[in-house]
Image: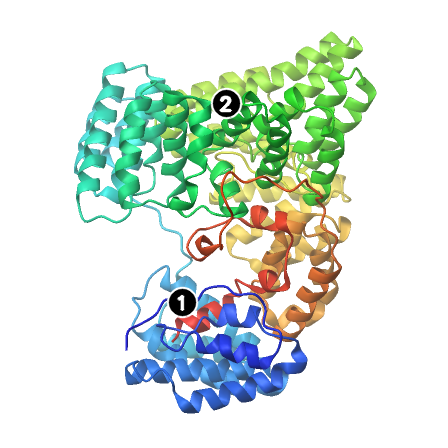
Amino acid sequence: MEMEDDPGPQPAAKNSDEWMERLHLYDNAWRVDLDNLYAELPSPEDWQAVRKGLESDVQKSKSSWLQEGARERRAESLKCFAAVLQGESGREKALEMYRELLRPYLSKHDNGYPSARKAREHHRHLMVLGSSKKAADDYLDEVFPGWKKMDGRHVEDQEQWQTALAEGRVDEGIELLWDEAKEAESYKKFSLLKKLHTLAVILERKLLKEKVLLLAEKDLRKMAKSDENYFPYGLDFLFEALGKENEWGKVRELTDLVMKVDKDEDQFVSYHLLAILELDGAQALLTALGTLPDRGINDQSTYLSLLASKNKELGREVCKALRESGKAAEAEVLLQYLIAASGSYDPYYRDLLEHHREGMKAFLQQVMKYDPFEERPLIWLAHLALKQGKVPQARQWVEKAIALDPSDGDQGKESRMEAYKVLAAVYAAEGNEEKAKFYTDVTKAIREGELADDYLYVGLRNEAIRRYQKALGRFENAYCLQSRLAKTLVEQGRIAEAEQHFVKAFELMPVSFGPVESHCFGCEGAFDDKEARDIAQRVFERVIKTSPDNPRTYYLLGMVFENRGQKEEAFRYYLQAFELDPFYYNCAIKIDRYLWNHPEKLKDHREALQQILKITPYYHLPKRFANRMDLKQAWLDADRLAQSSQHPLTLTPLTLPFAQGEPEAAKTKYIRDQIKAIEGWKREQLLRGNRFLENLTNLQ
């Protein structure tokens, strides 16, 4: 008997009989997807019948084509699943079976990361199933020695080209990097070529830029003719660079080549469509959209994922083409969907302001409910108010945006600090030229810092330091620039110089974060260095004494302890921050993660978990179910949310450029939750992605 494909996600079953039919779809599959089957369970009233059906089915062993060991593992995983569905009365039995399934699985894996990360996840599952911490420790020490010592951090030795560039030996560094890129394996080659290309651009070396693009193109053609059935990360830089050089004919040719091998990869499809636009015009682009089902894009979610993916410009161009063809209403609706799907991409908002201003305010107020922690709708409501001459309203909107996320660190180049650009315009409209100039200089300092980031990215640290210092000369209260400068000085061994910048950065942090702090480039590792952590602790403890009601400081101190590995102490500070601000969402995420990794503490913090669920943005709801092992209560919570939650968005139905088909691509394409949520959550969608059941499936 031949193996059949996994049947993939299905709608929820109406009763136990229908669910058992669903189970039998896996009879000839390699494994039974317990995560999907759990999500598709009928009401808990039918679970007893489900358990009996499972036990009976296990005895029949229908998948007789499996080898004996695999057949036994499948049977044991199904019995373990049935025991977990039983609740408290089935925990002991489930724990025993889970331990037995784990032993051969962990024993055959190497003793390194990411296997150790997976072992820690299993450790949490053992504890939730009833094991004491000591018993779980002892068990994993026996079957997977050394798992506790591996934290997943791996620092690679610095390459010779990195050392040369850091020391200012630019030509030598470029030559060494070129030699390494030429000989690198395909999975690494394009990321090295991208770095070389960035070096060529910022150093204005035209010949080097051409040389890099020729090598990238040569290797791409070679890969397309080989047995490779996928293309590595970083390849998109080639299409982007060729597009900037107006080499759209070559973009179309190369994307044609790669799509013959990997036809469903959205980044290739998006550049292919942009090439059609540039070469053949807007109408040709709209016609080409009708062929997308041939590329696995055949429903609303996959369509929006293509248009609002990494290459978001495609979405803008489709809207522009619709307007030019007399379909302005369709363009407006699509633009609204793209904003809901991406959240923070300023050009979408800018196009809405320029072309579809009439219903903009009402729509953006809906988006604020869809994601109450996204500041972009507030910023663009301020832009709208300024266009309408309503300066006081513009001030109110932009001040709310800044309070929500003062640092704006999740934005890319040229778009960070958009709120301060608006604030400068507000002051100018009020006649306060001094303040307008000050906030204009703030945004200029950030732009200069972004250019310094480019030099840091390619390894030219001394030039990056010089440029960070220049940017801070324009605006010294940018914590992100202070932090990046300090970290870069440390990397260059200039520890004493770095200290004053660490101190300044840490003093600024408590007033630079909102309820969803967004770290910009380089700041994520602000607490990685021991000296930096010690400085941060001193600064934050001093700030708490003078401003004890600021929840951000407790949160930051928690991050310091978490980076030290002192997770219980970190949790204590996160709790204090959350008590001061029950709508502190990033803090809520930290608490949620800690509790599900320390299940023995869950019972003492049920109220905190309920508050976390309450403040979770609509499109983030599945994340609150991913770690749950109280399967019955999770099912009831998901059912309640699916039944009672009013969808924050009421959008006009989207016109697709093709006939919508069955969402087959959902089985293989990754679709972000922010896109899937636009259509509204069903119970089974909220429940999919359960980490315990995914791991139990992998043990088969």
Q: Quadrant of the N terminus?
A: bottom left
Which numbered marker is on residue 6?
1
Q: Earlier in the sequence, mark 1 or mark 2?
A: 1
Q: Is residue 555 above or below residue 131?
A: above
Name the residue rendered at 44%, 32% in the picture. Answer: 287
Name the residue rendered at 68%, 52% in the picture. Answer: 616
Q: What is the total number of numbered labels drawn onto the structure image?
A: 2
- Name the foreground residue: 230 vs 278: 278
Name the residue rendered at 75%, 64% in the picture. Answer: 607
As drawn, is 88 to the left or to the right of 366?
A: left
| Kind of residue sitting beneath label 1 | Asp
Residue 422 quadrant: top right
- Name the foreground residue: 676 vs 517: 676
Which numbered marker is on residue 366?
none
Residue 90 quadrant: bottom right
Q: Position of residue 37 (x, y in %)?
A: 52, 72
Q: Is residue 560 above or below residue 179?
A: below
- Name the foreground residue: 394 vs 50: 50
Residue denoted by label 2: 449
Q: Residues within 10 Å of mark 2 (few under 14, many from 20)?
A: many
For the question of whether residue 609 can be seen, the reply is yes
Q: Secondary structure at mark 1?
A: loop
Q: Secondary structure at mark 2?
A: helix
Q: Is residue 667 above or below residue 504?
A: below
Q: Position of residue 370 (x, y in %)?
A: 69, 44
As drawn, is 132 to the left or to the right of 100?
A: right
For the question of whether residue 569 can be seen, the reply is no
- Name the foreground residue: 282 vs 427: 282
Label 1 close to label 2 by CB (< 8 Å): no
Q: Residues within 10 Å of mark 1 (few under 14, many from 20)?
A: some
| Kind of residue sitting beneath label 2 | Gly
Q: Quadrant of the C terminus?
A: bottom left
